[in-house]
Image (cartoon, rainbow, N blue to C red):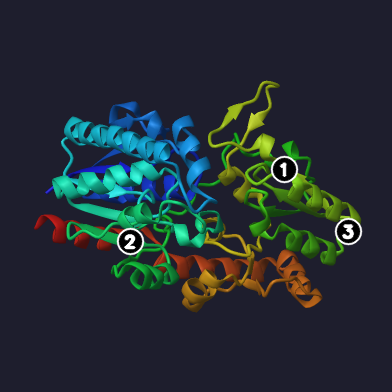
Amino acid sequence: MSKNIGFISTRFAGQDGVSLESAKWAEVLWEDRHISYWYSGQSDRSPEISHVVPEAYFGFPENKWINERIWGSGSRDRFVSSRIRELSEYLKSTLYKFVDKFNLDILIPQNCLAIPMNLPLGIALTEFLSETQMPAIAHHHDFFWERTRFSVNSVPEYLDMSFPPKFENMRNVVINQEAQEQLALRKGLSSLVIPNVFDFDNPPEHVDDYASDVRKELGLEEDDFFILQPTRVVPRKGIEQAIKLVSLLKDSRCKLVISHEAGDEGYEYLGMLEQLANEEGVDMRVVADRVGEVRQRDSEGRKIYTLWDLYHHADFVTYPSLYEGFGNALLEAIYFRKPVLINRYSIFVRDIEPKGFKLLTMDGFVTPSLAGRVRQILTNKKLREEIVDHNYAVARQFYSYSVVRSNLRAFISSLTGY
């Protein structure tokens, strides 16, 4: 029987993991004729199926005011407590409106009961689920104890109560084994690991006319090696190792292209990378001004491409992250059949590496021998095709939509009896 499903988060917009994975879940649910609706503070979903409440966004001024007073301090003012309760009461009333508006049967909180970017929203949702006993499947992408910024706080009772809460009417989903173990240890809650997924049953379409000129527009020659770093410029992405790799390749045709911008954590890291690239003689290009969430033209009439347009043209993908909750960029590279260099961050070692992918791996730093293997893959088409075809087949087995489909069917059946 088809159900009306309500997704809830602070934001459903852009290319962040929560927005991307929730859209995939909705696609899978639609295969069983379940209709998805969206509650958030920011949304790029269709207005007809969305309920946008600005106060639910983590960047809403009132929420930012609260955050400035509860993180990094061990005590809080009585007035702050009052503001938390007032905002959570208001948000709870909007949750009631959302459920009534779309006649919802099941809720799927997306990370808002795991990481307190909007503390009042987590409290509001906890109380709503307690009062209504409505079935819920909570999808947790990263928890507050994984972020140092939340380690000193003045709201331990709220974190205990709502991040996440413990309900008979709620099932918990995490994206890696470490999170599963920590949730059991810290909260006594059982959970199911459902990794991030991709639609490996439907390979990407070929390059169309719009994206046919990506190399030319980015200033690359046809015989250049397009080495793509498909991430934001933040320290945990380990981009200095991508620069080191290109330096060791000792080939002027190798161009390091970084797809996303800096700024989330300041610009000092970008400055360091630019200096390093200059010292190492590496042609590094940050093309964030030419990459957007949708295809369009900028104010100068230039084409704006999507990240997927860049993947089509890339020869090699670097992913030397120090830490990832899962690693969406890895699946994307495999989906577009690109060879990958990846750092063996902890989640990769435990959850992904045992699956049997053929990846070039590093343990914190790039070596000359590793650069030699990259050079071999770049110049040997037959070897490259064998590697990417093998990786696609492995990913299709372990990280396709079918993984989500079977588990969500079981959850919905256990929660509703159908």
Quick one: which residue is furthest to the front in this view? 78
Q: Which mark is residue 136?
A: none
Q: Look at label 1 and name its amino acid.
A: Arg
Q: Look at label 2 and name its amino acid.
A: Val
Q: CA distance from mark 1 to mark 2?
A: 40 Å
Q: CA distance from mark 3 to mark 2?
A: 44 Å
- Depth-wise, is mark 1 or mark 2 nearer the camera? 2
Which residue is nearer to you in this view: 19 or 290? 19
Query: Disc 1 designates what residue?
Result: 215
**Sequence-wise first label, 1 or 2:** 2
- Residue 386: x and y in percent read 59, 71
Considering the numbered disc 1 on the image, is that residue within a helix, a strand or a loop?
Answer: helix
Q: Seen in the image, is 304 located left or right of residue 367?
A: left
Query: Disc 3 designates what residue?
Result: 280
- Residue 44: x and y in percent read 42, 33
Which residue is nearer to you in this view: 125 or 71? 71
Identify the residue at image location x=23%, y=46%. 127
Position above or below: 192 against 260: below
Q: Look at label 3 and name its amino acid.
A: Glu
Identify the residue at image location x=48%, y=30%. 61
Which quarter of the picture shows residue 88?
Answer: top left
